[in-house]
Amino acid sequence: MKRLFTLAACAAILSGLASSCCNNAEAPKSAIDVIMSRYSVRSYTGEKVSEEQLETLLRAGMAAPSGMNQQPWRFVVVDDPAVMDAMTPWGADTWKAAGTVIVVCGKTTMGEKNDENPLWQADCAAVTENILLAAKAIGLGAVWNASYPFFHPQTQAALGLPEDIIPFSVIPVGIENGAEEPKDKWDPEKIHKNRW
């Protein structure tokens, strides 16, 4: 009986968390729904996301798989427009309209000897996708903007990152202004079985 109560209590808490962080938007019902309905959002209302929503996104990011379980991901949450301007040579209008960006960074070294971590980019890509899917799931808009290998030195300098912490992606997150349709990227001609 105690176990049933505990499970019921956990379900109620998770349900409350989901409803409180979803911005009153109807969230997709399953992981497949989220994946298939995700699209890049570049137009925002300017309303900032809550700290609770940001934590949900960061927790989802840190749930990503990691080569050798190194978990090289590091994050910088930026909501200062001046810092956003300093991060990119191309202007940061989309970022400022979103109000907040999550900069996914990777620690390029590992272990006590600070050996090179050859998997940091793959791990940071997994983190980035998790955050994008979580944003969709809780009713937020987001888009994957590249930092590495394009303007990462400028971003690194603007954020004051150590030498072995490289900014991999910049993810604006916010309340979507309008709605778009996801692109249908299914192409069976790109699939091969057993051999090319």
Image (tube, rainbow, N blue to C red):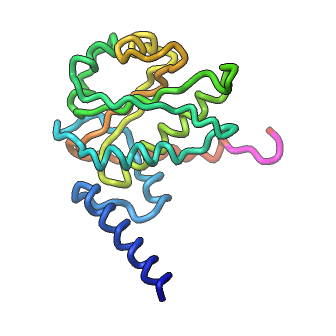
The residue positioned 45% from the left and 63% from the top of the image is 30
Question: Is residue 115 in view from this perspective?
Answer: no
Judging depth in this view, the residue of 52 and 99 nearest the camera is 52
Is 155 magenta? The answer is no
Residue 189: image quadrant is: top right
Question: Is residue 136 in view from this perspective?
Answer: yes
Q: Please state, as top left, top right, bottom left or bottom right, where the C terminus lies in the image.
A: top right
The residue positioned 58% from the left and 28% from the top of the image is 121
x and y percentages locating residue 26 in the rendered image: 28, 61
Asked if 29 appears above or below 183 in the picture, the reply is below
x and y percentages locating residue 185 in the rendered image: 51, 43
x and y percentages locating residue 70 in the rendered image: 63, 35
The residue positioned 47% from the left and 14% from the top of the image is 150
Where are the magenta residues, as a range? 191-195
Residue 101: image quadrant is: top left
Number of numbered discs overlaid on the protein picture: 0
The residue positioned 67% from the left and 27% from the top of the image is 111
Residue 96: image quadrant is: top left
Asked if 155 appears above or below 17 in the picture, the reply is above
Answer left or right for 103 relative to 46.
right
Is 194 magenta? The answer is yes
x and y percentages locating residue 99 in the rendered image: 22, 33
Asked if 19 appears above or below 111 in the picture, the reply is below
